[in-house]
Amino acid sequence: MNFTRMGAVAGALTATLAVAVPAASAADPELTAVNGHSDKWLEEATPTVEYKNGIKDTDATRVKEALDQCKSQSVSCAATTVGTPEKVTKWFDVENTGTGTGPIENCGENATSDIKQTLGGMHAFAWGWNVGANMDIEVAKGAKIGIKGEYNQTTTETKTGSIDIIVKPGERGMLKVGHDMERSVSDVTIQGGKFGGATISGVRTEIPLKEGAKRAGTDIVKCGQKLLMDK
């Protein structure tokens, strides 16, 4: 992918996707499941900036400074995807603060029959671009992100719904919601700016896929085991 004054192959997405629980279609492809409560893929990025004069730096702050140059009208930036992007489904147990939405506990000596309940809830999804060590970079106003260039910081989406959950004796259950994501690693070429230009390698990008915005399911474990949110 190439775009001028990219300004944000890595950065903090300010859009929030408020997604509740319409169930995924049976025809939807199964992707690698990721626990969104504990996942650190973005934060674990370790990019390197190398300027045209030979200076190299791996410090997240210095990488951020280099990428920030892309917001300038006098600097041109282009990003090239390295390898094949990976698609995953990032799952979260729904928020239950103040709503009383689970988890449903069917544990103990008196647990002899199934608990059947219809649950509704939502999770506020927020996605970002990162250069490691929680060093998010602000998305330049209007900058388009992603291989197709269709995702930007102003995109929001709200979904509502509910799902039936059955928790058998000896189990704990919670409603979970997921969003399909595309993860990629990019190299960024900077023309102009400090020292006449630079190359940044290993920038991680995570982009929500619009076609994967409706996933919902049940997070059910044995009593004593951890749910997604029990990270």
Image: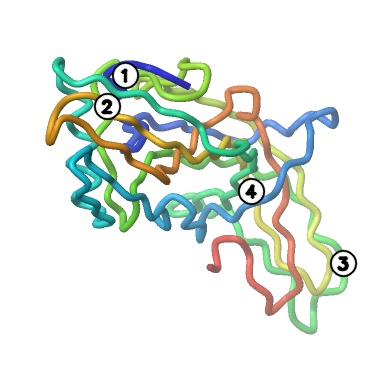
Q: Nearer the viewer, mark 1 or mark 4?
A: 1
> What amino acid does circle 3 point to?
Ser
- How many other residues sit within 10 Å of disc 1, few (<14), some (14-19) or many (≥20)? many
Colour scheme in the image?
rainbow
Q: Are marks 1 and 2 in contact (CB under 8 Å)?
A: yes
Quarter-of-image position of residue 87: top right
| Residue 184 drawn at (x, y percent) | 53, 38
Q: Are marks 3 and 2 in contact (CB under 8 Å)?
A: no
* Secondary element at tag 2: loop
| Count of numbered tags | 4
Identify the residue at image location x=12%, y=34%. Answer: 194
Q: Earlier in the sequence, mark 2 or mark 4?
A: 2
Residue 113 - label: 3
Q: Which residue is mark 2?
A: 7
- Closest to the observer, 136 or 6: 6
Q: Earlier in the sequence, mark 1 or mark 4?
A: 1
Residue 176 - label: 4
- How many other residues sit within 10 Å of disc 3, few (<14), some (14-19) or many (≥20)? few
Q: Are marks 3 and 1 in contact (CB under 8 Å)?
A: no
- How many other residues sit within 10 Å of disc 2, few (<14), some (14-19) or many (≥20)? many
State the CA–CA distance, disc 1 to disc 2.
7 Å
Q: Earlier in the sequence, mark 3 or mark 1?
A: 3
Left or right of 92, for residue 205: left
- How many other residues sit within 10 Å of disc 4, few (<14), some (14-19) or many (≥20)? many
> What amino acid does circle 2 point to?
Gly
Left or right of 94, for residue 43: left
Q: Which residue is mark 1?
A: 143
Q: Earlier in the sequence, mark 4 or mark 3?
A: 3
> What amino acid does circle 4 point to?
Lys
